[in-house]
Image (cartoon, rainbow, N blue to C red):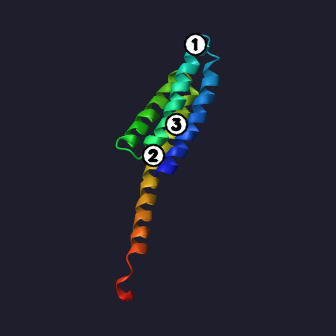
Amino acid sequence: MRMLCASTLIGEFFVIGFAGLVAMKDPSLTMGTVWTVSGIAMALSVLLCGLITRPGGVALGWAFQIVLIASGFVVPSMFFLGVAFAALWWASVHYGRKIDEAKARFAAQQVSPPADAV
């Protein structure tokens, strides 16, 4: 699960950077504000990559997805991109857990010999 979720978060890192470039065109926002908020969000996306396997890491990832969708109020295209990345986050968590369970079952089969191999 960690690899899939981290890949999604790194993709969001780049999307946030590009959204910062788009937000700079808004005359009501200063460049300092745009890059402070974008920089913090980009740093959080990288930080979350390391927190995924810790307790509450996936919940923090969901909170990050909500913030990403809400950023659409500043950059309207982020509504669509935020929903797309939230769907990717769901898929990463859902299928990542299935992959982890399959790996654990496979590892357990490799450790214990079959019952008829005596």
Q: Amino acid at mark 3?
A: Val
Q: Depth check: 42 or 69 in front? A: 42
1 or 3: tag closer to the N-terminus: 1
Q: Position of residue 27 (x, y in %)?
A: 62, 11
Residue, disc 3 = 46
What SS does tag 3 mark? helix
User: Could you tell whether 3 is left or right of 113 in the image?
Assistant: right
Q: Quadrant of the C terminus?
A: bottom left
Q: CA distance from mark 3 to mark 2?
A: 18 Å
- Side of 11 where 52 appears, left or right: left
Residue at x-position 51% and y-position 45%: 6
Where residue 51 sits, quadrant-wise, is top left
Which residue is pictured at 47% across the width and 49% down the height? 2
Q: Position of residue 38 (x, y in %)?
A: 55, 25
Q: Residues within 10 Å of mark 3 (few under 14, many from 20)?
A: some
Q: Residue 19, relative to residue 29: is it above or below? A: below
> Would you call the spot at circle 1 few (<14 residues within 10 Å), some (14-19), or many (20 or more)?
few
Q: Which residue is mark 1?
A: 29
What residue do we see at 52% from left, 36% from top? 46
| Mark 3 or 2, nearer chain start | 3
Q: Which residue is mark 2?
A: 90
| Mark 2: secondary structure | helix
Q: Secondary structure at mark 1?
A: loop
Q: Position of residue 67 (x, y in %)?
A: 45, 29
Circle 2 crowding by C-alpha within 10 Å: few under 14, some 14–19, many from 20: some
CB under 8 Å between callouts 2 and 1? no
- Which label lies toward us, 3 or 2? 3
User: Which amino acid is tagged 2?
Assistant: Trp
